[in-house]
């Protein structure tokens, strides 16, 4: 498969980025089976860039290219997949594809036991990840077979909904609020590349068939935006009714029965997260909306306001949903969590920030993720040693605090984890994730918002060094990232 990363400027003066397949297809959804070998050749067709990032790397690592990280450097990260963190597979530390270089080949095999579900791909050049993802460089990747672990989806109509964000046309990138909160949202949104732009907020239109159960697979491919999703029906002009959303999978992994049994009317998706759930379309003629509610990510955070993503029209002659799920298989795969596995150790980490210039807080903030009692520091691409080391075959518990007055999002490459506690209270949730939110600190409480997660380092495919970071990409680019080396048993 041949991909080209291209860029252009739209009518609002915004720089856009896109993966193009076969000359015209933009950011295609990749569908793979477990055991498949994926071969993808990435050609960087961006114009050469001169400025380098403060944390740039000049290391040469075998054939994974070299040179400074510039706005025109790129690479690919396969978010959520358990792949080797090595050259030509899923290495985001050293791999750089420079403009004008020959097409760079990614070649990897989907593990035979890989969880089936929704994943995604996006660029990960440190210092310029936010810029390229905000520009639209991202796409969905589906590992087929979720009906084996979630028979409820078998045979259902399928919709893949990709949420992105972008800068607001005519607003400078470094614009800041004069008051406590900006008067306009921080970013514009889009649904499957249909823009929902400030100030008109004209949403997309979704045509559905009436009273039909459907399987929606939603990817938050935004750089910085939280989505608090809701499906709203309007039986009449004065009544609105939130609809039940039955969660089937989170971050690509089917959840357990106690999660699917929970009746919920909203789903919070931080940047990078995915949710797959069942909905029932409205009766014919009923007005309905798919929307994101306002999310409060703190006094120092962005403004993620209420916005309608799609107006839903329910018509008996509407086109069929774009996809459909296979029939139920004869054998079912049960959910397997991590709670019964003894952790090899417990670590403590925390997110924090430091404002260098209070008169321009956004432009002067440094971002940190710190392990233990070490001194906070921004991620260093020149570091000769990883921040953390562990042994393949183990599981670990990490307690992660948020000491900042804005929400953060913990993400780790190559593996999944299970949430055990929030703020010291046990959470009985049979779900595996690779991305999770940690709410902001109010600046007054004696304790910080905290999660405790159990991380799965058992796969032999993940031996090597890879990243963990805040998946608000402004923060990741600003230094809120660390590295961990997974060492084969007996090699430490």
Image (tube, grey):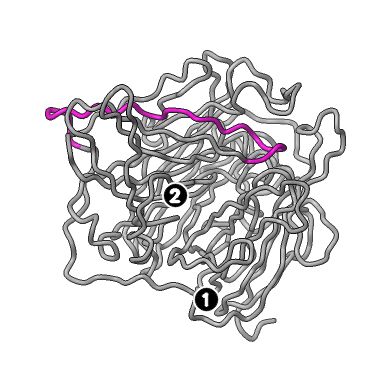
- Looking at the image, is 92 positioned above or below residue 422? above
- The foreground one among 30 and 402 is 402
Residue 458 located left or right of residue 234: right
- Label 2 sits on a secondary structure element that is strand
Mark 2 and mark 1: Cα distance apart in space: 23 Å
How far from the left and from the top, in percent, is residue 6? 51, 30
Discs 2, 1 touching: Cβ within 8 Å? no
How far from the left and from the top, in percent, is residue 456? 53, 71
As drawn, which residue projects farthest toward the front? 238
**Occupied quadrant, residue 266:** top left
Circle 1 residue: 458
* Among the two numbered marks 2 and 1 on one chain, the one whose residue lies closer to the N terminus: 2
Residue 232 located left or right of residue 416: left
Residue 487 located left or right of residue 21: right
- Label 1 sits on a secondary structure element that is loop
- Looking at the image, is 34 positioned above or below residue 381? below
Q: Viewer-nearest of labels 2 and 1? A: 2
As drawn, which residue projects farthest toward the left? 317
- The foreground one among 383 and 164 is 164
How far from the left and from the top, in percent, is residue 468? 64, 58
In the rendered view of the protein, which quadrant contains the C terminus? bottom right
Label 2 environment density (alpha carbons within 10 Å; few <14, some 14–19, many ≥20): many
Please tell me which residue is depicted at 62% across the width and 72% down the height of the picture.
397
- Magenta region: which residues? 297-320
Label 1 environment density (alpha carbons within 10 Å; few <14, some 14–19, many ≥20): some
Please tell me which residue is depicted at 52% across the width and 16% down the height of the picture.
199
Please tell me which residue is depicted at 46% across the width and 23% down the height of the picture.
196
Residue 274's disc number: 2
**Occupied quadrant, residue 361:** top right
Residue 383 in magenta stretch? no
């Amino acid at each position: 498969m041949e991909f080209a990363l291209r860029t252009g400027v739209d009518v609002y003066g915004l720089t856009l980025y896109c993966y193009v397949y076969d000359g015209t297809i933009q950011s295609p959804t990749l569908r793979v089976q477990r055991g498949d070998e994926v071969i993808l050749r990435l050609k960087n067709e961006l114009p050469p860039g001169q400025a380098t990032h403060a944390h740039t790397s000049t290391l040469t690592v075998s054939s994974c290219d070299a040179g400074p990280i510039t706005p025109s450097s790129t690479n690919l990260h396969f978010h959520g997949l358990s792949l080797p963190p090595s050259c030509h597979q899923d290495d985001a530390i050293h791999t750089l594809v420079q403009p004008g270089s020959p097409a760079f080949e990614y070649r990897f095999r989907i593990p035979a036991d890989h969880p089936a579900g929704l994943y995604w791909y996006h660029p990960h050049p440190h210092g310029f990840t936010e810029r390229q993802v905000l520009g639209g460089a991202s796409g969905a990747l589906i590992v087929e077979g979720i009906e084996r672990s979630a028979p409820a989806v078998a045979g259902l109509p399928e919709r893949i909904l990709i949420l992105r964000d972008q800068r607001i046309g005519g607003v400078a990138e470094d614009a800041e609020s004069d008051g406590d909160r900006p008067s306009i949202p921080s970013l514009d949104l889009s649904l499957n590349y249909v823009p929902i732009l400030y100030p008109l907020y004209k949403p997309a239109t979704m045509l559905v068939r009436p009273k039909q159960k459907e399987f929606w697979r939603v990817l938050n491919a935004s750089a910085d935006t939280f989505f608090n999703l809701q499906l709203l029906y309007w039986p009449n002009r004065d009544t609105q009714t939130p609809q039940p959303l039955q969660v089937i999978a989170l971050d690509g992994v089917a959840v357990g029965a106690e999660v699917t049994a929970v009746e919920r009317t909203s789903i919070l998706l931080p940047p990078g997260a995915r949710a797959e759930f069942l909905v029932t379309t409205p009766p014919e003629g009923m007005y309905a909306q798919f929307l994101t509610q306002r999310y409060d990510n703190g006094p120092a955070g962005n403004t993620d306001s209420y916005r309608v993503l799609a107006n839903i029209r329910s018509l008996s002659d509407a086109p069929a949903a774009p996809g459909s799920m296979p029939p139920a298989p004869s054998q079912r795969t049960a959910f397997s969590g991590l709670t019964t596995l003894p952790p090899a150790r417990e670590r403590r980490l925390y997110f924090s920030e430091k404002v260098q210039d209070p008169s321009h807080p956004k432009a002067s903030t440094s971002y940190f993720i710190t392990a233990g009692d070490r001194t906070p520091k921004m991620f260093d691409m020149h570091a000769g040693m990883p921040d953390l080391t562990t042994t393949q075959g183990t599981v670990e518990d990490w307690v992660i605090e948020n000491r900042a007055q804005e929400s953060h999002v913990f993400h780790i490459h190559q593996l999944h984890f299970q949430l055990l506690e929030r703020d010291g209270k046990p959470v009985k949730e049979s779900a595996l994730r690779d991305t999770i939110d940690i709410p902001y600190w109010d600046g007054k409480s004696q304790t910080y918002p905290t999660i405790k997660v159990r991380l799965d380092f058992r796969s032999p495919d993940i031996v090597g060094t890879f990243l963990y970071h805040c998946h608000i990409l402004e923060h990741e680019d600003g230094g809120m990232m660390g590295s961990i080396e997974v060492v084969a048993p007996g090699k430490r």
